[in-house]
Image (cartoon, grey):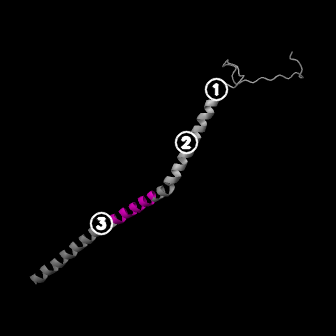
Amino acid sequence: MRRSGIVVAGIMLLGLAAMGCQNKVHDENIALHREARELRARNLELETQLRQSPDPAALQTMQQQLAARDAKIAELENQLRQPAPGAPQDSLLAGIEVTRDDLAAPLP
């Protein structure tokens, strides 16, 4: 009788140990699933960024277009700084154009 009690106690102890191990494995499984979801989300985010970024050839073309546009802007700014032929030298009158209409009524 005593021997069967020890055997029963041993079986119960093994059952409890097995349940504890199963719980630990379950917790690890949940943690691994969570990590896999996070990695999938990060992977999707990086793939989206990669799809949205231009390829090197397109980037170089855009940089050349920007350089050409900047050169044109600089050229036009330099043209604005140079006085037009026959323009007054007084900077207060610069940019003002006056016309005269001889057929119009005289000013009072």
**What residue sits right under mark 3 in the picture?**
28
Circles 2 and 3: CB distance less than 8 Å? Answer: no
Crowd class of label 1 (few under 14; some 14 to 19; many from 20; radius 10 Å): few
**What residue sits right under mark 2 in the picture?**
67
Q: Which residues are magenta?
A: 31-46
Residue 15 falls in which quadrant of the image?
Answer: bottom left
Element carrying mark 2: helix
Residue 26 falls in which quadrant of the image?
Answer: bottom left
Quarter of the image containing the C terminus? Answer: top right
Question: Residue, x 49% and y 53% (percent of image)?
Answer: 56
Element carrying mark 3: helix
**What residue sits right under mark 1 in the picture?**
82
In the image, taking residue 40 as reference, residue 82 lies left or right, namely right
- Whether 87 is drawn above or below 20: the answer is above
Q: Nearer the viewer, residue 84 or 94?
A: 84
What predominant SS class does the magenta segment belong to? helix
- Whether 105 is drawn above or below 40: the answer is above
Measured in 3D between alpha carbons, the distance from the residue under mark 1 to the one under mark 3, in whole angstroms, is 76 Å
Q: Position of residue 46 (x, y in %)?
A: 44, 57
Type of amino acid at the residue the image marks with label 2: Ala
Residue most extreme to the top? 108
Label annotation for residue 105? none
Q: Nearer the viewer, mark 2 or mark 3?
A: 2
Measured in 3D between alpha carbons, the distance from the residue under mark 2 to the one under mark 3, in whole angstroms, is 56 Å
Element carrying mark 1: loop
Crowd class of label 3 (few under 14; some 14 to 19; many from 20; radius 10 Å): few
Q: Earlier in the sequence, mark 1 or mark 3?
A: 3
Measured in 3D between alpha carbons, the distance from the residue under mark 1 to the one under mark 2, in whole angstroms, is 23 Å
Residue most extreme to the left? 2
